[in-house]
């Protein structure tokens, strides 16, 4: 479905360009009035330039921001040392997002009971394991994370559970009734792409919670759905620039302590955010 929508969007873009070009050629060939032809030429050039500029801006935004948590700096020591401030931001988000995703599971609760700093230890173990990899072995995608070998087997087992995702079968204890607990794969929430910002408009609930706190998440989800409805119409809809400013003004200063606004991208687009919750 996503590929179909992307293909349709490209087709519509091409059609719009082709129609614009044919209109311009019609004016130039058939209208003899020099002033009118010059006006048409200026309109055409201005329209194409504006469209190109919008596309360039959109590509630039996509190149910098991701709706997932970037973890490339956790895996590359040299880059991490060069971008220490950015790494600290993503490291803080990582500390917050893991409880948001797995805090309901037994393995996570037991790990916290054994060591309240286990999340920090896990993140350090990931970086150390990546550093210990043979020089020819690279982590190219989320699946490759399973090749990391931790010095602490307990942390290794927990990380494996996060990567795999699954269902916890409750222990049978006398007098208790528990239901199976499911938990998602970590790859759903992280990216190995070298991004420098979080795309708030398309971020998942756990990632939003790691940035703004759980109490703010529902407000963000509601607001971005409202703004999507406003900008969605092809004619008469709100400009995405205006919607972006509204979104930013509403939530930029509601982030958690320690999170800086420079790592947050509030760009609103015509992509339905409901599919990213």
Image (cartoon, rainbow, N blue to C red):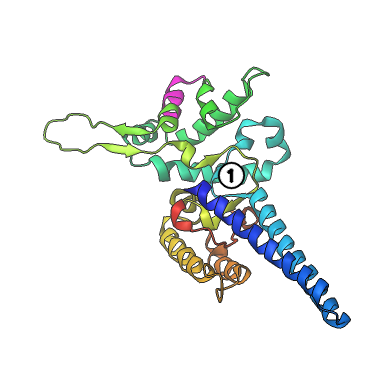
Q: Position of residue 144 (x, y in %)?
A: 54, 26
Q: Is residue 275 above or below residue 101?
A: below
Magenta span has 88? no
Q: Closest to the observer: 258 or 74?
A: 74
Left or right of 141 on screen, residue 81: right
Q: Is residue 27 above or below residue 21?
A: below
Q: Position of residue 248 (x, y in %)?
A: 58, 66
| Label total for image | 1
Q: Closest to the observer: 62 or 37?
A: 37
For numbered disc 1, what is the local secondary structure? helix
Q: Closest to the observer: 31 or 270?
A: 31
Left or right of 51 on screen, residue 255: left
Residue at (58%, 44%) from the top-left corner? 90
Magenta span has 158? yes
Left or right of 106 on screen, residue 99: right
Residue at (48%, 45%) from the top-left corner? 96
Name the outermost residue toward the front: 30
Name the outermost residue toward the left: 175
Q: Closest to the observer: 50 or 42?
A: 42
Extent of the magenta region:
151-159
Residue 85, image quadrant: top right
Q: Position of residue 81 (x, y in %)?
A: 71, 36
């Amino acid at each position: 479905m996503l590929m179909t929508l992307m293909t349709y969007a490209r087709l519509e873009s091409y059609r719009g360009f082709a129609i614009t070009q044919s209109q311009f050629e019609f004016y130039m060939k058939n209208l003899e009035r020099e002033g009118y032809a010059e006006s048409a030429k200026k309109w055409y050039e201005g329209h194409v330039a504006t469209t190109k500029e919008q596309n360039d801006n959109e590509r630039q935004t996509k190149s910098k921001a991701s709706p997932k948590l970037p973890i490339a700096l956790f895996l590359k020591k040299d880059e991490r040392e060069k971008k220490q401030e950015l790494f600290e931001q993503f490291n803080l988000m990582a500390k917050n997002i893991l409880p948001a995703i797995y805090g309901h599971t037994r393995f996570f609760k037991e790990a916290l009971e054994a060591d309240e700093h286990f999340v920090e230890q896990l993140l350090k173990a990931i970086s150390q394991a990546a550093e210990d990899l043979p020089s020819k072995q690279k982590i190219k995608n989320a699946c490759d994370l399973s090749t990391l070998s931790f010095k602490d087997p307990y942390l290794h087992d927990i990380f494996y559970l996060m990567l795999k995702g699954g269902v916890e079968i409750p222990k049978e204890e006398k007098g208790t009734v528990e239901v199976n607990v499911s938990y998602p794969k970590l790859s759903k929430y992280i990216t190995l792409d070298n991004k420098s910002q979080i795309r708030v408009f398309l971020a998942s609930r756990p990632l939003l919670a790691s940035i703004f706190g759980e109490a703010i998440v529902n407000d963000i989800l509601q607001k971005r759905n409202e703004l999507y409805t406003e900008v969605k119409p092809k004619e008469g809809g709100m400009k995405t620039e205006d919607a972006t400013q509204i979104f930013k003004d509403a939530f930029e200063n509601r982030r958690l302590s320690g999170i800086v606004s420079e790592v947050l991208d509030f760009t609103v687009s015509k992509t339905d955010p409901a599919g990213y919750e």
